[in-house]
Structures are given as structure tokens and as C-alpha cells.
């Protein structure tokens, strides 16, 4: 009997593919998925009146649904930097779209590489150029391979493979990047390595497009929203701004979201078929709130670019059957900066101790043991306009900041994107300005600069009682305001010290 049992075990072990064997490794496989401009309300599980997102809905129903998950910034490049570094993007000068990382930053890919992971990036990069030789391309930031774009992309995306010249990849863009991701996972399996894949979709960023079968799902929208004002967005024909009826625009936007959702389903099916599903952490989120061209049904105040909830709160779900055994909904505040310390904890590799992080380890939340965040989350739209009389000194040689992958949207007449990052050797009082937020477990402080050097608009919201940020409590709660202002100012000072480059001197 014992001999038969041993023989049976050997036969089963021999039948396992390299991919299935890897699923039993001590480290979980990790996949980070991110939609581009995908707002909190734009999922079926969050009650959207029109959108069809069956895969994300299923993940939310089966896994850990993060209902108070935030992008670290209300725009894309800064948020992506926070995922990679665990730090607020103002610390290293990624102030807005088109600003790069600094080469001195330590990324989550660098750190997971030390734990033995095979690392790949697929899709939108947008924190520097993806070409070979760039000091901030995915390879320089710790990835073993990449099939990526400097910015966003539509159908038939032009992508660079490991820094090479861009090549057109025929097909729906989300399906294309998932196909490349699956190829990467298969190769990682043959090496018997755990894998770390970062998949940043080009959808649903405007200009919008879609496959006929996806567009057909939303054929009723132009008539349904015929009374709404036209919206401004990029023309797929000219690359310039154009105004179009909201219903037509939403039809195309929602087609992109549904196609992205379907591609996630393709990835999940692959993981299940190859025995990888149980021990693979799949984490989806958006990079900022809904843009004006997609605004329709949000219960939250604000849009992309604003520090109100509608600009920073995004859809987020984690699926990991080996550790998340039953579905849960979390109301605990979490942010994209938390990804690095969380993944490092799971991979049992230390985070950098030579520089401040803004994220926290969310493993207790994943395990159901955290319902109150131990420290606040801060947001800050840095005023990055050049100051009179101050010379900007580039942090990176300009030739490495010139993009190569084309996109539909023209900028100053060109169809590629260039990046910038500049030295900031001293801290000025005006550097503290710009819309900024301290978000606690209950209260949210919002500061805006008004006219004059000292004029500041102060707002305080009780998000537990007022999630739509309709009632300003600043005058009623001066003690809370004062305390939070003090903490916010101290955090800003820490960020500005990092911005000068002080973190790299340790």
C-alpha cells in the first residue's frame, strides 16, 4: 500500500507543468493591473447604471474589495511613480504627467528581484522613456523585460520590446498587453521562478475607440444621454481637441473598459488552467479619478486632477485564493504607495531604510486584521510652474527624456511624449503651496491657496458622515483643523527635503 502511494505521488509530481510547480513556491506570484483614468464609480460592482464589468465584479465578489482605495495623486504619472517607489511622487519630482522618475529611486521591481522574482512590465510606463539607454526605462527600474509605451495607446498599439524601436502590435490594446504578459509568465515558469508582472493598460484613457462587438453593447447611450452637454476630448482623426456628444463618447469609453475587463478575464483563465490561480496575488486599481470626458454617475465630489474624492479614490480589488479565503469588503483607507511595502513583506525582502516611505504594509488588511489605518494619507498637487528668475537644471540629460513611441494625441504638434525632471536645491515658502490634503480615518483636511501670499482656503470634511464632501466643518472644528494643518506642514517639509535630493546622500 505504501509503495502504491509513493508511486502515485511521483506520477502526480511528474505530471505537473513548470507553471504548476511554480504555483507551490514559497513566494506568491504577483500581478499588478492598472486602468488608465478608470474612476471609482466605473464598475458594475460599484453600481454604475450602464457599464458592464463582469470580471472585475467577480473578483470583487470572490476576493478583497477595497472600497476606500486611493491613487497617490489625481493624475497618472505621479500615481505610477508611487506604485514603483512606495513614496509620494513629489519626493522625486514626478509632479504631473510628463515628469519622469529620478534614476536614484529604488523600485519595487529592484527589491523583488532580490527575492528571486522574474519581473516584467507591460503597457503604459509614463514615468520616463522606455527606449534603450534611458536611465528611467523599465530595465533601469528593475524589470527583466518589458513591452511598453512611453504614454497611452489605442487599438493596434506601437510598443517597444526591451527598449527597441516601437513596433505595431495588431489588436485590441488590452488584449495585446495581456498576451505579452502571459508569454512572460510562461517563460518565468520554465525558469521555475516566481513572477512579478506589472500590467498598465492604455484604457480607458481618451481618445476612445473600441471593437464593434464592444461598442454594440452601448448602442443605446447616444439617445439616452442626448440632452447632456458635449464634452471635449482628443480626436482620433486629427489628434487635436474636439467637442462631441456625451452619449457617443461614453459609448466608446465604456467599450474600452469592457474590453479591458475581458482581457483580465483572459489572464485569470490562463492562471486557473495552469494551476497558478491559487498562489497568484492579482491586484487591480485605477490610477486617478474619472476625467471630464467620462463624467456621469459618480457619487463622489471632483474629477481627475482634483484632490477631492472623485479625483483620487479609485476602484481596487485583490484576488488571492491561497490567502484570501472568503470574500470581504474593506472600508480601511489604503493607497497606491502601500503596494511596495506590502509586496516586500509578502516576499520577505526588506524595504529601503535610507529614505522615507509614504506607504504602509497592508498584509494585516489582507489577512483581515486591520480596520483602522495607523497613519494618515497625504495628497499634494505641487505647483510645478517655473518660478521667475529661477533657472531649471535638468536632472537627466535631455536626450534620454525624448520619447519614441507614438500616440494619437498631439502635443505641440508632435505625436510622441518627452519628459522632464529638474533639480530643486532649496526650499522656498511658496513650495508649500498647491492643493493639498491630509486624510485620516474620519476627517479630511483640504487646503487651497487663494489670492495673496498668505490666503489659504481651508475645508474639513467628515468622510464617515459625508462621503460626498458636501458639508465643510472647518469653522465648527478649529482644533481639528489646527492639529491636522500642523501634521500636514510637517509632512510637506519631509517631502521637500527629499525633493532637494537629500535622500540620495545617505
Image (tube, helix red, strand yellow):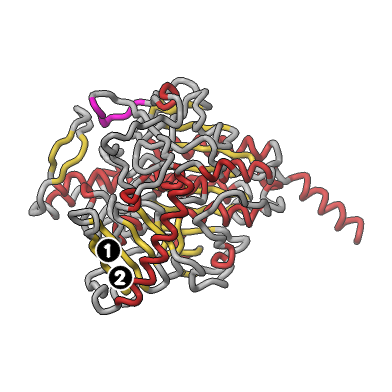
**Which SS type dominates the magenta stretch?**
loop
How packed is label 1: few (under 14 Cα within 10 Å), some, or many (20 or more)?
A: some
Residue at 63 percent across and 45 percent down: it is 112
Q: Which stretch is magenta?
A: 406-412
Q: Residue 194 at what x, y percent from top left?
A: 66, 45
Residue at 38 percent across and 63 percent down: it is 438
Residue at 44 percent across and 45 percent down: it is 80
CA distance separating discs 1 and 2: 7 Å
Screen quadrant of the N terminus: bottom right
Q: Which residue is mark 1?
A: 300
Do the residues bearing badges 1 and 2 touch, measured as CB atoms within 8 Å?
yes
Q: Is residue 411 magenta?
A: yes
Q: Residue 202 at what x, y percent from top left?
A: 37, 39
User: Residue 380 is drawn in which quadrant?
Assistant: bottom left
Left or right: 411 as drawn, with respect to 442:
left
User: Residue 205 is drawn in which quadrant?
Assistant: top left
Task: Give the vertical position of 14 relative to 379 (above or below).
Answer: above
Q: Which residue is mark 2?
A: 467
Task: Give the vertical position of 228 relative to 330 (above or below).
Answer: above
For marks 1 and 2, the one nearer the N-term is 1
Residue at 58 percent across and 37 percent down: it is 142
Amino acid at each position: 500500500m505504501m509503495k502504491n502511494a509513493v508511486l502515485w505521488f511521483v506520477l502526480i509530481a511528474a505530471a505537473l507543468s513548470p507553471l504548476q510547480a511554480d504555483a507551490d513556491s514559497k513566494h506568491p506570484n504577483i500581478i499588478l493591473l492598472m486602468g488608465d483614468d478608470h474612476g471609482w464609480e466605473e464598475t458594475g460592482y460599484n453600481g454604475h447604471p450602464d457599464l458592464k464589468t463582469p470580471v472585475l465584479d467577480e473578483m470583487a465578489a470572490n476576493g478583497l474589495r477595497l472600497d476606500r482605495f486611493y491613487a497617490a495623486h489625481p493624475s497618472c504619472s505621479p500615481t505610477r511613480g508611487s506604485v514603483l517607489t512606495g513614496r509620494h511622487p513629489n519626493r522625486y519630482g514626478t509632479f504631473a504627467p510628463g515628469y519622469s522618475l529620478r534614476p536614484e529611486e529604488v523600485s519595487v521591481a529592484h527589491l523583488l528581484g532580490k527575492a528571486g522574482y522574474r519581473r516584467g512590465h507591460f503597457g503604459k510606463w509614463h514615468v520616463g522613456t522606455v527606449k534603450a539607454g534611458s536611465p528611467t526605462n523599465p530595465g533601469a527600474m528593475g524589470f527583466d523585460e518589458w513591452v511598453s509605451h512611453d504614454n497611452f495607446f489605442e487599438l493596434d498599439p506601437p510598443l517597444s520590446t526591451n527598449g527597441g524601436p516601437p513596433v505595431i502590435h495588431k489588436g485590441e490594446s488590452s488584449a495585446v498587453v495581456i498576451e505579452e504578459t502571459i508569454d512572460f509568465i510562461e517563460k518565468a515558469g520554465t525558469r521555475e521562478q516566481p513572477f512579478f508582472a506589472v500590467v498598465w493598460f492604455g484604457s480607458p484613457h481618451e481618445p476612445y475607440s473600441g471593437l464593434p462587438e464592444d461598442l454594440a453593447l452601448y448602442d443605446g447611450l447616444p439617445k439616452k444621454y442626448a440632452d447632456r452637454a458635449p464634452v471635449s476630448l482628443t480626436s482620433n482623426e486629427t489628434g487635436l481637441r474636439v467637442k462631441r456628444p456625451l452619449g457617443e463618447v461614453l459609448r466608446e469609453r465604456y467599450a474600452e473598459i469592457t474590453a479591458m475587463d475581458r482581457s483580465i478575464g483572459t489572464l485569470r483563465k490562463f492562471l486557473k488552467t495552469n494551476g497558478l490561480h491559487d498562489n497568484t496575488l492579482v491586484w487591480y486599481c485605477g490610477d486617478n479619478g474619472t476625467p471630464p470626458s467620462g463624467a456621469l454617475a459618480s457619487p463622489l465630489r471632483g474629477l481627475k486632477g482634483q484632490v477631492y474624492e472623485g479625483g483620487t479614490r479609485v476602484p481596487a480589488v485583490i484576488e488571492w485564493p491561497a490567502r484570501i479565503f472568503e470574500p470581504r469588503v474593506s472600508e480601511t483607507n489604503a493607497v497606491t504607495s502601500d503596494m511596495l511595502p506590502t509586496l516586500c513583506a509578502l516576499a520577505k525582502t526588506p524595504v529601503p531604510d535610507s529614505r522615507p516611505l509614504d506607504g504602509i504594509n497592508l498584509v494585516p488588511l489582507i489577512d483581515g486584521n486591520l480596520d483602522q489605518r495607523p497613519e494618515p494619507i497625504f495628497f499634494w498637487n505641487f505647483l510645478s510652474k517655473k518660478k521667475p528668475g529661477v533657472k531649471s537644471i535638468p536632472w537627466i540629460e535631455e536626450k534620454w527624456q525624448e520619447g519614441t513611441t507614438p500616440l494619437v494625441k498631439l502635443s505641440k504638434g508632435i505625436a510622441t511624449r518627452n519628459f522632464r525632471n529638474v533639480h530643486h536645491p532649496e526650499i522656498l515658502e511658496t513650495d508649500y503651496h498647491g492643493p493639498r490634503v491630509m486624510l485620516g480615518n474620519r476627517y479630511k483636511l483640504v487646503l487651497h491657496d487663494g489670492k495673496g501670499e498668505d490666503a489659504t482656503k481651508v475645508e474639513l470634511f467628515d468622510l464617515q458622515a459625508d462621503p460626498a464632501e458636501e458639508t465643510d466643518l472647518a469653522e465648527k472644528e478649529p482644533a481639528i483643523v489646527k492639529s491636522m494643518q500642523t501634521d500636514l506642514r510637517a509632512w510637506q517639509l519631509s517631502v521637500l527635503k527629499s525633493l532637494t535630493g537629500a535622500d540620495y546622500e545617505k
